[in-house]
Image (cartoon, grey):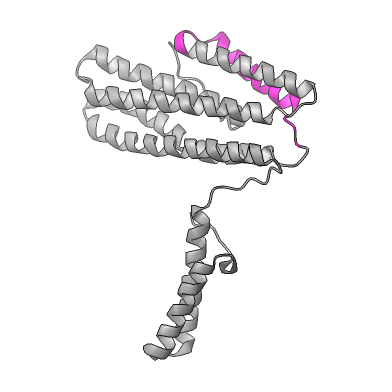
Amino acid sequence: MMKLANPLYYPVPVLIGAIALVVGVRMARLPSVVVVPVSVAIATAGAAFRKGQEPERYELNNPALEQELQSVRQQAVMVANQANALRDEATKLLTEAHQMELLGTVQYACDRASELPGNIDQMARRLGGADSLLSVSDLKSQLQGVEARLASSTGAARTQWAELANTLQRNIQLAQEGRDARQAQVASLSNLILNAAGVLQQLQNKLRTADLTDTAQALEVRSLSDEFNSVQENLSLLTGSDNGLPSQISS
């Protein structure tokens, strides 16, 4: 979706619009009543395009945190793009009737990944303000959610939930001491996104090389999809965008 922008803040689109006006009126000899709206539209569309290329600004009044969060969002965009490509690839590869459940699992994982940039934007809005600190009560609520999942998880999923629980416990301690835990939270988010990217790459590689008619290899693809979903749940909880969907992780 293109963002609205004031053309006066973007001189290049304004220049292009002015050139279009001159060319239309003086060279093409078109009526100004036609050319002026067209040149204004060109400048406005150009400004909106340039604004869309700029990194998201979160107005955190903390330049270091702002830069880190923008970097994390860029990581999230890359993961989302990678997931969209994987979704298309899986749709082409998994076409047999007995593969539909596996396709659904992969598609679900990719759909969740595409939500990441928006989830980070939501988190950034909650972190805004010069004196904004993470709420201890919010962090404790997140920790309770993690501990509930930890109690019912095993294998790789349990390891991931345990790591997130440790992270939240450290952030709660920072917040209780009156220190700003936002940077620690963003660093944790970055680590999880990098983890998600790694699992997603493994899933893509396995999907391309596995003999999907072989039950054991198909289960490996399913296991990686489940692992990716587990990372996604961690991310959703950390950004405060947990939609309450039950975990699909069983291993």
Instruction: Locate the C terminus and report the quarter of the image it occupies.
Output: top left
In this rendering, the count of numbered labels is 0
Q: Is residue 101 visible?
A: no
- From this viewpoint, which residue is outermost toward the front? 64
Q: Is residue 68 visible?
A: yes
In the figure, is residue 143 to the left or right of 76?
right
Q: Position of residue 85 (x, y in %)?
A: 33, 38
In the figure, is residue 53 to the left or right of 146?
left
Q: Position of residue 81 (x, y in %)?
A: 40, 39
Q: Nearer the viewer, residue 220 or 19?
A: 19
Q: Which residues are magenta?
A: 132-156
- Picture layout, residue 18 above or below residue 128: below
Q: Nearer the viewer, residue 58 or 123?
A: 58
Q: Position of residue 203 (x, y in %)?
A: 34, 24
- Picture layout, residue 59 above or below residue 90: below
Q: Magenta stretch mostly in which secondary structure? A: helix
Examine the image and state in which quarter residue 118 appears.
top right
Identify the residue shown where x is 19% and y is 19%.
213
Magenta segment: does it hold 134? Answer: yes
- Picture layout, residue 188 above or below residue 154: below
Q: Position of residue 91 (x, y in %)?
A: 28, 34
Identify the residue shown where x is 54% and y is 48%.
55
Q: Nearer the viewer, residue 41 or 16?
A: 16
Identify the residue shown where x is 28% and y is 35%.
89
In the figure, is residue 217 to the left or right of 10?
left
Identify the residue shown where x is 59% and y is 37%.
69
Magenta segment: does it hold 149? Answer: yes
